Image: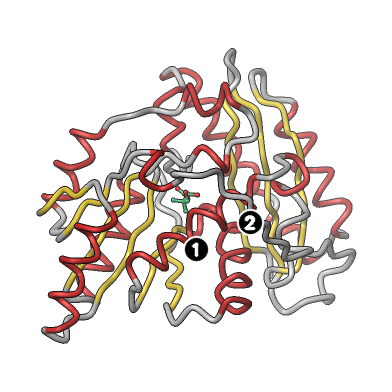
Amino acid sequence: MKVITTIKELQALLSEYRSASKSVGLVPTMGALHAGHASLVDRSVAENDVTVVSIFLNPTQFNDKTDLEKYPRTLEADCQLLEEHGATIAFAPSVSEVYPEPDTRTFSYPPTDSVMEGAFRPGHFNGVCQIVSKLFTYVDADRAYFGEKDFQQIAVIRRMVDDLKFRVQIVSCPVIREESGLARSSRNTLLSEEERQTAANIYRIMKQSLPMVETATVAEVHDYVVNEINAVPGLEVQYYSIVDGETLADVKSWDEADHIVGCITVYCGAAPIRLIDHIKYV
Ligand code: PAF
């Protein structure tokens, strides 16, 4: 595996692969790689001749600078994991390489980017679109792999791809969970062992609410999940939104959309650490 830090070097190498008619998969990451990322890399390696994994902690998508400072940085271990999973290129540029000038572009895809994370983290999806559009331009991949853990992010990126007519195919890959049910996330390393166990209650309670779809209203299911999670010491729900899985607009009844998803954000523990998850109801 080659570790590359400049766009010029990346593009020179990719043009050699392209001349040899090799297909290219891209896995965008912010590092602190775990089994969830490994599953994206495995999928890309299986479906493409060349797999590029970007490792870039993108400052423009952090509206909270403390969150950015706290974010784990583990480049050496990341490269080892990528090597083991058969990635071809690890692209790990500096901030000045990617943003020699401040990026003043704005992206707006409501309601996908204005609700939930978009409402609670103003500017977050604008920053995600800034970096992902740059990566799509640098790599010009055939396929790009994203984890469904960031369910809303995939919906926003699909809108951007459609808007800007990138040729890349977006491949969404299932959430990878710990044995306890906790969704794998780079942020989990910031939790103590006890907090990790506490955090497992988030998905456990969401799962418990699944059969309620037969008998309860959307509002009742919403309140059940919020009240049960808030009753666990160490957990506090920021929002729970039950939405149309395509548009991400709120739904009021179970027959309002073909695909209905509950999306949650919960603060966990003393720090506290902000965790997101989702569950499919319909
Ligand atoms: O999902 C992430 O890790 C990031 O939002 C992404 C897509 C790598 C952009 O920085």
Element on which disc 1 rests:
helix
Q: What residue lies at 41% left-to-right and 36% top-to-bottom?
A: 186
Amino acid type at image mark 2: Arg
> Which mark, by number, is residue 133?
1
Q: Residue at x 33, y 73 (%)?
A: 141
Up the image or down, 62 lies above or below 91; here it is: above
Q: Is 148 on the left-hand or right-hand side of 245?
A: left
Task: Judge depth for marks 2 and 1 and give the one in front.
Answer: 2
Q: Which mark is residue 105?
A: 2
Of labels 2 and 1, earlier in sequence is: 2
User: Outermost residue toward the top?
Assistant: 270
Q: CA distance from mark 2 to mark 1?
A: 11 Å
User: Given the current orientation, which residue lies at the most extreme front position?
Assistant: 101
Residue type of the residue flagged with mark 1: Ser
Q: Is residue 58 above or below residue 74?
A: below
Give x and y (percent) for residue 210.
67, 57
Task: Answer whether labels 2 and 1 touch (C-beta < 8 Å).
Answer: yes
How far across and how far down the image is residue 144, in percent?
38, 69
Residue 177's x, y, as percent?
A: 42, 47
Q: As rendered, which of 115 and 233 lies closer to the eye?
A: 115
Packing grade of label 2 (10 A; few <14, some 14-19, many >=20) is: few
For residue 46, say whether it is visible. yes
Q: Nearer the viewer, residue 117 or 19?
A: 19
Q: How is the image coloured?
A: secondary structure
> Is residue 28 toward the left or the right of residue 116 in the image?
left
User: What is the secondary structure assignment of the residue under circle 2?
Assistant: loop
Which numbered disc covers residue 96? none
- x, y percent for residue 9: 19, 57
For image coordinates 63% across by 56% down, the residue present is 105
Tell me if mark 1 has few (under 14), some (14-19) or many (20+) residues whose alpha carbon lies within 10 angstroms of its own. some
Where's the N terminus, which quadrant? Answer: bottom left
